[in-house]
Amino acid sequence: MSETAAPAKGKSLKELDRAVVRFAGDSGDGMQLTGEQFTTESAWAGNDIATLPNFPAEIRAPAGTLFGVSSFQLQFGSQRVYTPGDRLDCLVAMNPAALKVHLRDLKPGGLLVVNTAAFDKRNLDKAGYAANPLEESTLAERYRLHKVDMTALTYEAIKDLPLGAKEKDRTKNFFALGLVSWIYTRPLEPTLEWITKKFAKNASIAEANTRVLKAGHAYGETAEIFAEHYTIEPAEMAPGLYRAMTGNRALAWGILAAAQRSKIPVVYGAYPITPASDILHELALHKRFRVRTIQAEDEIAAVTAAIGAAFGGAIGVTGSSGPGIALKGEAIGLAVTAELPLVIFDIQRGGPSTGLPTKTEQADLMQALYGRNSESPVVVLAPATPGDCFYIAYEAVRVATKYMVPVMVLSDGFLANGSEPWLIPDPETLPPIEIGFRTESAGFFPYLRDPATLARPWVRPGTPGLEHRIGGIEKQDVTGNISYDPENHDHMVRTRAEKVRRVAQEIPPTTINGPATGDLLVVGWGGTYGAITAAVERAQTEGRTVASIHLRYMNPLPPDLGQILREYRRVLVPEINSGQLVRVLRAEYLVDAVGFNRMRGLPLASEEILEAINQLVGSPT
Amino acid sequence: MSAGGAEAKEAPKYTKKDFESDQDVRWCPGCGDYAILSAVQKTMPDLGIPKEDIVFISGIGCSSRFPYYMNTYGFHTIHGRAPAVATGLRLARPDLKVFIVTGDGDGLSIGGNHMLHVLRRNVNVTILLFNNRIYGLTKGQYSPTSELGKVTKSTPLGSADRPVNPLAFALGCGATFVARTVDRNIAHMEEMLRRAAHHKGAAFVEILQNCNVYNDLAWNVMYDKEQKLQYELRLEPGKPLLFGPQDDRRAVIMDGVRPKVVKAKDVAASALWVHDETNVNAAKLLADLFAPDFPVPIGVLAAVTGPVYEEIMLDQEQKAISERGPGDIAKLLTSGDTWRIS
């Protein structure tokens, strides 16, 4: 991996335990790629990492505008990194708009690297700067400002290559990458390898990117302006083989693992929607797992195709974001009453309506729990980290097929696109998915139930002697015949609910991060795991008796949850919504839980959660 | 490979009775659906498919109760979505013979989008659309096939929207098999059901069906003996478009690019329009013919071959497996960029 870091000549090398870096520029500046490569380099360096890509909903937003700014943030450290970081240690701004949008997140005294070439009159106007901020003294006084003409330096490095001005200009993000890689002593090898692979068919482009990357690196090393650079020791992580994992890919691979283990095909129905489309793209690559993807004509067709597949004895899966889940509601109710297994991914984004397609939110919990007509309970699971999405997707298939019930998975935009170093599991250690299609005709009824799970038998059409009809009309228990009988309906409503409740027997004891009793319990779910854990661990080191738990089963809730809640004086529930889980907890357990709620389309910051903790239990004395 | 791609396994000798379920049929007495149910049950033994390999999928509406009465596998789903359910089922289980039963409201209004896509994808399903030009189950509102000006509970002064023509719609969607039949013409209906069930790809059959409660005799032109004699045009491959009583035989011919009705005796044999099921352009013209200016065509308008969605999808899967072997999650997890921490 990385060679032993020695300070460059005339520079001092400082050891840090963590750093937060954000690359920001125009949508066309390649900031996502730059961030991803920097992440890979940091993974090679052995650091723990959390990332936060942030990009506009517009595909080609007008250049230079504030709303066209795209950014990629990551935190990397020698200790456990739970979040992409709250405040920035280093901001790279490729144009005035990026500076304007992101400067407020840079710590005072933080490293500010700007591409001066982009600070012309036109771009300054577009960003709303009356005067060039780089020429004002305040910026240099508050931050360690480094003005670099990256465009000119890039051109200089590749002036002899047979490329057009546009192609040359497009490589300048690698100058920034090279420079920041030097600042944080990242190994360039993974990026050089990436260039070789990616541009194997275009030698000039490969050469240009290689040269520009190295030029950026060399510039840091030799330019007089950088007096110091940094090193961050590898983190102490569990031994094993790691890879970078995003939430969407992990969901897709969890389904693949389930397909292989269960030995039955998967039909994934989806309609393109941000931020869920990448699951469809990923699954479409893996036909060898007998995963059949349908790009359906709409959200309803996507879910009903999955239901049709489940009726046929395959694993039916559909995925979308909040608006699409709303459209699927009636069909999910069909799966509830037909008692067919179905897995539904909801990659939550800001709402209502179209809302903030590329930004994160946790506001679909109520929709997942209650967002259908009448009483149509489903199992709801929520992954805590990008890598956890793998296990949750697998668990969703396992539970759906065991209980013959729809399972909704609540991921979000932050988990979907964010990545973390992920310890690759041995798939053999995953719990088995045992699917026993009924073939015995003697004593068969479509709604004859397993006494332990209340699941009805799953029958593959094509099985002789078991021909039967099911549907959305209320049916008599056991026989499955249409029934309008009042008592039967009451019984069936309770039975469907009880079936979901019994999934609680699958839930392991809740892990408590901290003391088993105390002043405060912080309860979280979904993508806020990192921010909450970081805040609670800070509070603990500051001497407070604070603990946290993170729910992965949202419905049913863990059987030990009621008892745990009573062991603390106060309960705090941070969420990226206006208070949904907190309502559920108050209603279910009569506990005086309070919420901490921010709806900005961004992950919660651990600093603000820590403040909320302090407000409830008092700052340490 | 027989009808619908079901596996070639020996089917027992069935009778109509084998396809009758134990459920009481709950349509209104006198409903046209009874005749259709009977015709379907009667033609099932001819398909040569084991009944456990047959699935009926429906949406919502009077017609959509159909699966409950068939002693096969069946799924009564939600309004308009049967084509999408069937598409997922076919992709999961290409060995099954899948029928979709729908109506003018279910298939052309709330489910119009899915109908479009199941036809354009040419999913291997047999679609029976019962067209009674009215919403029956919700007690008598006008439907997307009701005539302009239709007076119903929801349109007391007459409907303001023009009807859609199911055959023209299906052809416009790229359907590879399009036919029309009539609930009171049992022999013809059975013939059309057999033809449709044997078609490879999406087969669309419009069945003119009578709702005797909310829209009685909407298709009287096909029921009334005298009118039927005047207007029924039987489409038969290789036969000219001739109709009407023997003493007043008429022909549909092409006048430039317009269909025109003329006296048969005035037309030279060479000028007759001879029906060709493989000519989809001609079928599009036929789809628009209707009384009183034209005859009412019944029969197979178009039957052509086309690529079948699930076949292509499953071929891709088979190819991927045969070239690179079945998927291996352990290998996938460790593929690409990884690093070891010891």
Image (cartoon, grey):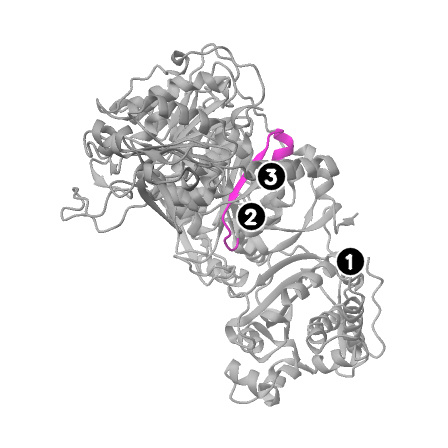
In this view of the protein, which residue sits in the foreground, B139 or A110? B139
> Would you identify the image quadrant in which residue B331 lies?
top right
Residue B237 appears left or right of A534: left
Q: Position of residue A193 (x, y in %)?
A: 79, 59
Contact, CB < 8 Å: mark 1 with mark 3? no
Q: Secondary structure at mark 3?
A: helix
- Chain under numbered label 2: A
The Cα–Cα distance between marks 3 and 2, rounded to whole angstroms, is: 38 Å
Q: Secondary structure at mark 1?
A: helix
Compared to residue B4, the image places residue B172 above or below, namely below
Q: Which residues are magenta?
A: A258-275
Contact, CB < 8 Å: mark 3 with mark 2? no
**Which amino acid lies under the numbered mark 1 shown in the image of this protein?**
Lys
Of the numbered discs in the image, which one, if any, rests on residue A197? 1
Provide the residue designation for mark 2.
A384
Of the numbered discs in the image, which one, if any, rests on residue B312? 3
